[in-house]
Amino acid sequence: MNMELSRRQFMAGAGAGVAGTTLGSLGFGAIETAYADSIRAFKLTGTTETRNTCPYCSVACGIIMYSKGNLAKGEKAEIIHIEGDPDHPTNRGTLCPKGASLLDFVHSKTRTLYPQIRKPGSDKWERVSWDVALDRVARLMKDDRDKNFVAKNTDGVTVNRWLTTGFLAASATTNETAWATYKVVRSTGILAFDNQARV
C-alpha cells in the first residue's frame, strides 16, 4: 500500500512538533527534573553494617544495625537505622513492633550506658568503672554464699544449696554461652535460676 504525504499533512505534523518543543521550553519539561530532585539519596550509602541480636525477648531475632561515622578518622559512629536480618534463620528479616522500634531504644535518653551504684542512704546514683562494678558483685555474692550456703539438710543429706540469691539469665544468647552460664550458676549451688524467656 503506497502512502503519500501531502504538503498540507507535512506542514501540520511539523507544526505539531514545533508546538510540542515550544511547550517544553516554556517550563512544562521541568516535571522530570522536579521528579528526579524529589527522590532522596539512599540513606544507607556509606554506612557500616553490624549484625546483632534483638535484646527484647527469647525469640532472639537477628538484626542489622547501620552506623555512620569513621572511627579511624576520629568520627563518632552513630546508629542511624536498624532492620531485621534477612539471612537470620529465626526471623528471616521480619521484626515485631518492639524490634522495629529498636532505634528509639538505642537513642533513648533514659538508657543506662555504664555501671552505677547507689550507696546505702544515698539518694543518687554514682558512675563507677566496670572493674569496680564486677568486683562489687563478686564480693557481695561471695559474702552472701559464705553466710547462707547449706551443705547438708536436716537429715544429714548433702544438698549444697544456696537459697538466698537468684540468677536471671539472658535468652538471646548462643547455646554454648547458655550452657556455660548454667554450669557456673548451678556449680555455686543457686537454685533460683530462671531465664528471660519465661519472664
Image (cartoon, rainbow, N blue to C red):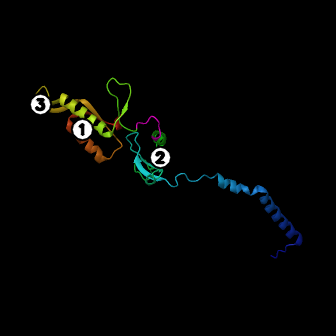
Tag nearer the camera, 1 or 2: 2
On whether residue 111 falls in the magenta region, the answer is: yes
- Quadrant position of residue 156: top left
Image quarter of residue 130: top left
Q: Which mark is residue 157?
A: 3
Q: On the picture, is 53 further left or further right than 131?
A: right
Q: Which residue is mark 1?
A: 185
Amino acid on which disc 3 is placed: Val
Residue contact between numbered discs 1 and 3, judged by CB atoms under 8 Å: no
Q: Could you tell me residue 52's position as x and y percent?
A: 40, 48
Q: Is residue 16 magenta?
A: no
Which residue is denoted by mark 2 in the rendering? 79
Q: Give the crowd class for mark 3: few <14, some 14-19, many >=20 residues within 10 Å.
A: few
- Under mark 2, the amino acid is Ile
Quick one: label 1, few (<14), some, or many (20+) residues within 10 Å?
some
Cα distance in 3D space between marks 1 and 2: 34 Å
Q: Main secondary structure of the magenta part?
A: loop
